[in-house]
Amino acid sequence: MIGRKPTDHRVGWGHVGEVRVCGGGQGRMWRVSTPTLGDVVAVLDALYPPALAESWDAVGLVTGDPEQPVRRVLFAVDPMRVVVDEAIAWDADLIVAHHPLLLRGVSSVAATTPKGRVVHDLIGSATALHVCHTNADNANPGVSDALADALGLLDTRPLKALPAEPVDKLAVFVPVDEAEALIDALAAAGAGRIGEYERCAWSTTGEGTFRALAGASPTIGQVGAVERVTEARVEMVMPRRSRRAVIEALRAAHSYEEPAYDVYELAAQPGDTGGGRVGVLHTPLTLREFAARVAAALPRTEHGVRVSGDPERWIETVAVVGGAGDSEFERVRAAGVDAYVTADLRHHPATEARAHDEPALVDVAHWASEWPWLADAERLLVAALAERGSTVETRVSTICTDAWSFRA
Ligand SMILES: [Zn+2]
């Protein structure tokens, strides 16, 4: 049991009492701590923010005490009986599942019902259950990224992009020799951050003029006299949520009694989160070859891989939606892709798409389309915990929980 974090690992990260001190390489000592369920959930919520979940969804913790230690985590698509049995047999402390156990309202979890029995067994074995469903679909990287990666898609973008965080632009007029200090103050309050750059600002100089009225205490000039001042116009962007803090910083840093400034709400832009992905294959494949790639990339199911389209047509651009993708045909058409890979396609929407000679359709098992995400979530959770000096043992369930068990 070797950790990667040196002995000065952050204090305050809520590890439970058991701190194992182990020998590291080159005679160094390393400490490994076991996270609490609350710690693990905090990491999962950062990876898959609950705010990204659809309004009808039920994500988050289903069973478990945030104070309990988490040593073993099992990742699975469905928190079904067989998966819960696997978790209990492996002595898992936590199941991270994609699909909710309890999506609709329940008035009883008595052990006399199948789901009530599962809830009892989870609590009885101190196995926590945490659900990342549409919040994992909409996150980046999320469920469809894992599917796109498995199929070798490059340059992916969301099929159904959520709007990026709302942004304002601030323009403020300040005496030229105060401009740099003002930019520092605004940046410290959250303005001027663009991607991996901070303190971004643009300025030009011009002339400001004003006449102070009786009762004013002008920083420059006299009451009643027209003043002219060389001022910089400084422009900076800011997240809309920081507007109040930035304006307060502006008023605190600016020497004028009444600083002049404008706040513009910038047009909404698509962001990098949202469901489905559109990407491109490194090398075009025939539909026959592409379908074979899909079959090889995903776990085998009785459902298999169903294909609609001319096997010899060329496929270069592809849309994918992990899980049921019936509702996204409009967006897939608008994206102008050569093929659409998803699950649960029904007869009418599929035949309509075929009649328009639109994208070739590759229909896979629902479970299989979401299964690649498990390893992704596992890797990201382990890495994020390691950064905090904590380790957990993890496993991805390979039990196929797709609904279809055989073909006659
Ligand atoms: Zn699903």
Image (cartoon, grey):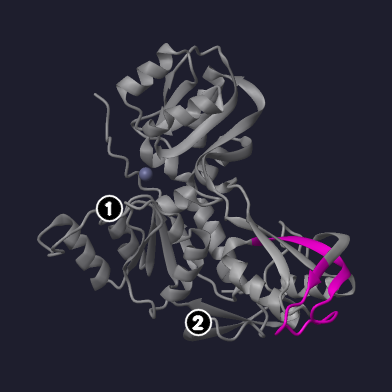
Q: Nearer the viewer, residue 46 or 10?
A: 46
Say if the magenta span includes residue 235.
yes
Quarter holding residue 175: bottom right
| Residue 269 in the figure: left or right of residue 53 | right
Label 1 lies in ligand 1 vicinity (Cβ under 8 Å): no
The quarter of the image holding the N terminus is bottom right
Identify the element where label 1 is drawn: loop
Q: Work out whether residue 405 can be spotted.
A: yes
Dot 2 amino acid type: His
Q: Pinpoint residue 29: horizontal percent, then vertical percent.
A: 67, 84
Q: Position of residue 121 (x, y in %)?
A: 22, 66
In the depicted structure, whether residue 193 falls above or below residue 353: below
Would you name the residue on which mark 1 appears? Answer: 80
Instruction: Tell me the residue at 74%/59% (across/down).
Output: 196
Left or right for 189, reference 308: right
How far, Cα to Cα, is label 1 from label 2?
30 Å
Query: Which is nearer the N-term, disc 1 or disc 2?
Result: 2
Residues packed near mark 1 inside 10 Å, few (<14), some (14 to 19) or many (20 plus): some
Q: Is residue 298 magenta?
A: no
Vertical relation: 276 (above or below) 77: above
- x, y percentage for residue 138? 48, 49
The picture places residue 353, in percent across and down from the top left corner, at 42, 18
In the picture as drawn, the residue positioned furthest to the left comes out as: 112
Magenta span of residues: 209-238
Residue type marked 1: Met
Q: Quadrant of ligand 1?
A: top left
Q: At x 68% / y 80%, what residue is drawn?
A: 6
The quarter of the picture where the C terminus appears is top left
Q: Is residue 4 visible?
A: no
Query: Residue drawn 72% across and 68% down?
Result: 260
84 to the left or right of 132: left
For label 2, the residue is 15
